[in-house]
Image (spheres, rainbow, N blue to C red):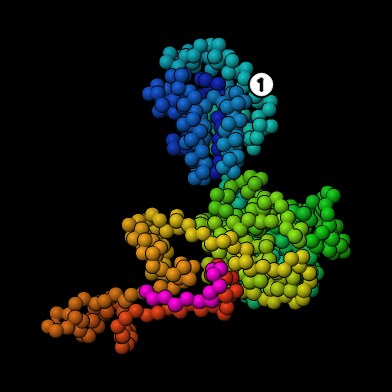
Amino acid sequence: MSDATTINVPSMGLIVLVAVSGSGKSTFARAHFKPTEVVSSDHCRALVSDDETDQSATADAFDVLHYIAGTRLRRGLLTVVDATNVQQSARAELVKLAKSHDVLVDAIVLDVPLSVAIARNEQRPERNFGRHVVERQHRDLQRSMRRLRKEGFRRVHVVGESDVAGVEIVRERPWNDLRHVHGPFDIIGDVHGCAGELRSLLATLGWRIEFDGDRPVGAHHPEGRKAVFVGDLVDRGPDTPGVLRLVMGMVAAGTALCVAGNHEVKLVRALKGANVNPTHGLAESLAQLEGETEEFRSEALAFMDSLIAHYVLDDGRLVVAHAGLKEAYHGRSSGRVRAFALYGDTSGETDEYGLPVRYPWAQEYRGRAMVVHGHTPVPEAEWINNTICLDTGAVFGGSLTALRYPERELVAVPAEDEWYEPVRPLRTTAEDRLPATLRIDDVAGTRWLDTGAGRVKIPEENAAAALEVMSRFAVDPRWLIYLPPTMSPVATATADGYLEHPEQAFDEYARWGATRVVCEEKHMGSRAIAVIAKDADAAHRRFGVGDGSSGVVHTR
């Protein structure tokens, strides 16, 4: 517990006020938090009964309180619960609520002398519950203060009566919240000890590598770009220490960020003396680190142990996590969020190769943020629902890949060798796709589409009409990668006998801002679009169709 008058609270999370009636907790909440951030049990009691003192409405009031608080937490908003919360059962419900939304929960205790609380209650005739009620609350509070940290609160701040007036609330940005960092970024896939390939990729991307003697110890980009590593720097490859030394130098200099990978987590446990199975390249990393100084091993351990599981960047438009992250977990803090970011959406089972079975979470992803990750090696990087995996198996003889953001440009260098034999053949993202089921919520309702010509609104009624036509007449929607546009016609000609006249047409194009017009002979009728794959297997990999066809021809 802290007794300081400066109280640090999470900018996104749950704050539980703990105090007896008459302690001034509502006054404290109004002084330090926005009215919209405070959810008061008295106000909720009034909402359901028109009387904030009606104790018979307490159960309904707390149902409303929990609903409002839960909704705010789901939306990522700081929420302060203004209630006595002196009983462990009441606090347990709030801790459970915070955990269900994967946010941090702090407690602020107002430790006011019993005599002061009784005197204040006696001055409020409409709220005077009796001396015995305040005494009971005070006993509950004193018993609770000894065990608050054990109940799941991250921090417990105790404020005495003499300190209340001088309290300053400081809002802390979560460690994973780098929305104020805008890049541009070079996001680099799983390196796995391939130091040579990392240097080649950085050089290809235009980075200038810095050396200490003949050892790379850092790098910077002349255009001010920032590198972001998706984790799994270590294991399997020939030079884990070399990779760590270079990346550690870049992170220390502020030219790079790095999230934790599952291989770093396991290596940290091994270096701390835990009994771990030295498989999947861990033995190689431990042997290579044995050749380094104790100072370097300590620095490498501290670096890997400090890595964050995921970052939210560029005003929330970019999320980087080793194994990816579903939208509900973006910017959140909990054990299950960290586990998802490190290991993916696992089923708890293993496949025939002894590797974890993972659910293809990216197929269900519909989030606004681009999610860039690694973890599961694929032959080549492929976009799936605004997510992309950059682990292209460099250590297995594939390539080391980077994504230039926001350009969405992929840059790769081939592996120098097959440094480690894969346990399982590399599979494309398409091969791991579930049988295609079209989702109605992808097209139903009012939609907004971002296009090269700006944002386009599709009203619900137009979406419904299009869905009706396509469901009856269109080819399999997975083939519809291109629909030819219709050129907007010019105004009807004023000259008799002409639908359109060239002179008026050119004048209208000029008014639209067109400086060049290409004229072609027009043939009546619709154009046909042919989408052709190499063969049925290629069609299945690219489009997810499984009917044996290798192409389709359709008209607009």
* Amino acid on which the number 1 mark rests in the picture: Arg
Determine the secondary structure under disc 1. Answer: helix
265 on left or right of 545: right
Residue 507: x, y in percent? 23, 81
Residue 304's place in the image compared with 513, above or below, is above
The quadrant in which residue 154 appears is: top right
343 on left or right of 364: right
Q: Which residue is mark 1?
A: 143
Q: Is residue 203 visible?
A: no
- Closest to the observer: 263 or 523? 523
Residue 309: x, y in percent? 66, 53
Question: Which residue is depicted at the point 48% across and 40% down?
Answer: 71
Q: Which residues are magenta?
A: 545-556
Question: Which residue is depicted at the point 64% across and 53% down?
Answer: 345
Crowd rating for badge 1 (residues with CA inside 10 Å; few <14, some 14–19, many 20+): some
Q: Quadrant of the C terminus?
A: bottom left
299 on left or right of 438: right
Residue 231: x, y in percent? 69, 60
